[in-house]
Image: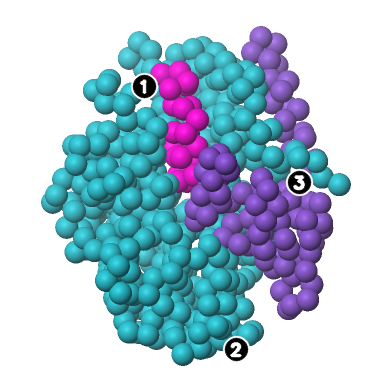
């Protein structure tokens, strides 16, 4: 589990924000909370800044707070644009 | 239902990275940077996570010599000045006080070389928390104690601290306090550019600060300074795509052409200019133009903007966050009367960001040979410091840039120093 241990340390580092998937939402308290999964690590995070986030969506988690919902359409578009980068075609890429 | 499209693996594809690298190399070769007496294109990253990612993935060694990456003041732990470290240490030593901190701060020395880790070993109650909300919960569980959260970090981290204060009020937790050493990134970038101390053609803009603030917060880099400015994510493909955007734009608008049409500033000689005067966003999956308005609103509600001292940069106007007066009951600085209040400059006044020439380490370490201040301003790379790797190592750090895992010196030491020292 050496790799997992390294990744866990990364999660703990203050500066890092990591993408994690919402597996459960908890509306019991005043602040919306969620359980997120990141590489098998589960954490409870606040959805105070992303109350619209649904189960199955990915959020950017920083110091226990989801600071943004990740946009799948943009993710797919970015990857596609970069994949099409062709050093010889003389186009945009 | 989402797929694993956001899994970091998607953004670490070696074939895609190679393709982007090849294109960057082609553009640089065509532009002729770094050849025949022409200077290389200089790109500064001002986020510790970018610094780490560039070092960890070995990107510097893969990029052509015509493209030079330098690190700026992007590590919040590193830029926290000695005065604030001393105050945090003083808090930790108070009987009855529990200091809650992010792990990164534990080994940063104060002006006397003492660390929170040492204070803890000597009996101080210092606890590492992952989230500011954990500190509020700790205070709720221990009503007879006073729990102080050491709030260090940029605009990505500050909303969480604001949330903790609001949560403490909502829960009636009156033994939770925030010590705010939060800093704002745009004023530091402005201060750096205003010194003219080093040439910076373009910036890799921190993706997670932008996720909160939105890309508009960095428009001044392009509009006022004519710098290239591209919001970048943190995986290798993210960073390479942003660098490609930077070199393509720079190649399309050589500085001679810009000077001819009055688009470049003659007092800030640059290889290129940002003719379109726009910030580009290559981290669209996380960064919207408006950022996260909820997080911005809460920061605005809880914090006010104040002048702040930065290690290596000196005092920068309107570059720090302190609690607003209405939250004074949760303000550690007020509760323990820690520092003089520095009023913010009127927002209408232009930022007088001339740095004091002596703004090197701003502390006693300056005389010990530590060149942390120069590293934070991108004037030297870590291996150019005489202490680097010899007497200053992660196990025995002399300066904050070696202490923090996100510091430029720590990143170079861990991933790049052999190569650099072998060359020098």
B136 to the left or right of B37: right
Q: Nearer the viewer, residue B94 or B226?
A: B94
Quote the CA–CA distance across marks 2 and 3: 36 Å
Label 3: few (<14), some or many (≥20) within 10 Å?
A: some
Q: Are marks 3 and 1 on the same chain?
A: no
| Residue located beneath label 1 in the image | B39
Quadrant housing residue B385 = top left
Give the chain ID for the purple colour: A
Q: Are marks 2 and 3 on the same chain?
A: no
Numbered mark located on residue B409 in the image: none
State the extent of the magenta-drawn residues as a range. Answer: B44-65
In contact (CB < 8 Å): disc 2 and disc 3: no
Quadrant housing residue B270 = top left
In the rendered view of the protein, which quadrant contains the C terminus of chain B?
A: top left
Q: Are marks 1 and 2 on the same chain?
A: yes
B200 to the left or right of A80: left
In contact (CB < 8 Å): disc 1 and disc 2: no
Which residue lies most toward the front here? A1
């Amino acid at each position: 589990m050496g790799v997992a241990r390294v990744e866990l340390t990364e999660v703990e580092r203050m500066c890092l924000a990591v993408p994690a998937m919402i597996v459960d939402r908890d509306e019991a308290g005043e602040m919306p909370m969620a359980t997120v999964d990141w590489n098998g690590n589960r954490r409870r995070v606040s959805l105070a800044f992303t109350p619209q986030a649904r189960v199955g969506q990915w959020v950017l988690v920083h110091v226990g707070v989801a600071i943004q919902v990740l946009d799948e359409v943009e993710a797919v578009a970015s990857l596609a644009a970069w994949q099409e980068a062709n050093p010889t075609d003389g186009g945009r890429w | 239902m989402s797929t694993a499209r956001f899994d970091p693996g998607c953004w670490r594809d070696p074939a895609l990275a190679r393709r982007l690298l090849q294109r960057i190399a082609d553009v640089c070769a065509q532009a002729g940077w770094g050849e025949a007496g022409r200077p290389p294109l200089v790109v500064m990253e001002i986020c510790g996570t970018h610094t780490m990612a560039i070092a960890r993935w070995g990107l510097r060694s893969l990029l052509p010599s015509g493209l030079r990456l330098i690190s700026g003041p992007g590590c919040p732990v590193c830029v926290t000045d000695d005065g604030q470290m001393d105050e945090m240490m003083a808090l930790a030593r108070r009987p009855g006080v529990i200091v809650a901190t992010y792990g990164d701060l534990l080994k940063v020395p104060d002006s006397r070389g003492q660390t929170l880790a040492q204070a803890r070993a000597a009996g101080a109650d210092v606890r590492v928390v992952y989230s500011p909300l954990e500190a509020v919960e700790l205070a709720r569980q221990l009503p007879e104690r006073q729990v102080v959260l050491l709030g260090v970090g940029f605009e990505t981290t500050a909303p969480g601290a604001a949330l903790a204060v609001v949560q403490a009020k909502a829960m009636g937790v009156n033994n939770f306090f925030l010590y705010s050493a939060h800093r704002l990134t745009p004023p530091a970038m402005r201060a750096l550019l205003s010194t003219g101390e080093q040439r910076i053609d373009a910036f890799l803009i921190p993706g997670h600060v932008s996720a909160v603030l939105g890309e508009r917060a960095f428009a001044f880099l392009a509009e006022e300074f004519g710098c290239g400015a591209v919001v970048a994510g943190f995986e290798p493909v993210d960073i390479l795509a942003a660098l490609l955007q930077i070199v393509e734009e720079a190649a399309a608008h050589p500085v001679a052409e810009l000077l001819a049409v009055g688009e470049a500033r003659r007092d800030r000689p640059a290889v290129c200019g940002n003719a379109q005067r726009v910030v580009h966003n290559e981290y669209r999956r996380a960064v919207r133009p408006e950022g996260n308005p909820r997080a911005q609103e809460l920061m605005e509600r809880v914090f006010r903007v104040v002048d702040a001292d930065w290690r290596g940069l000196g005092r920068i106007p309107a570059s720090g966050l302190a609690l607003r007066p209405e939250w004074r009951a949760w303000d550690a600085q007020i509760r323990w009367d820690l520092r003089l209040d520095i009023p913010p400059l009127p927002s209408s006044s232009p930022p007088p960001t001339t740095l004091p020439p002596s703004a090197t380490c701003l502390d006693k370490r300056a005389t010990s040979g530590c060149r942390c201040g120069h590293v934070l301003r991108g004037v030297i790379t870590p291996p150019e410091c005489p202490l680097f790797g010899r007497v200053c190592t992660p196990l025995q750090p002399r300066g904050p840039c070696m202490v923090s895992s996100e510091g430029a010196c720590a990143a170079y030491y861990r991933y790049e120093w052999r190569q650099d020292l072998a060359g020098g």
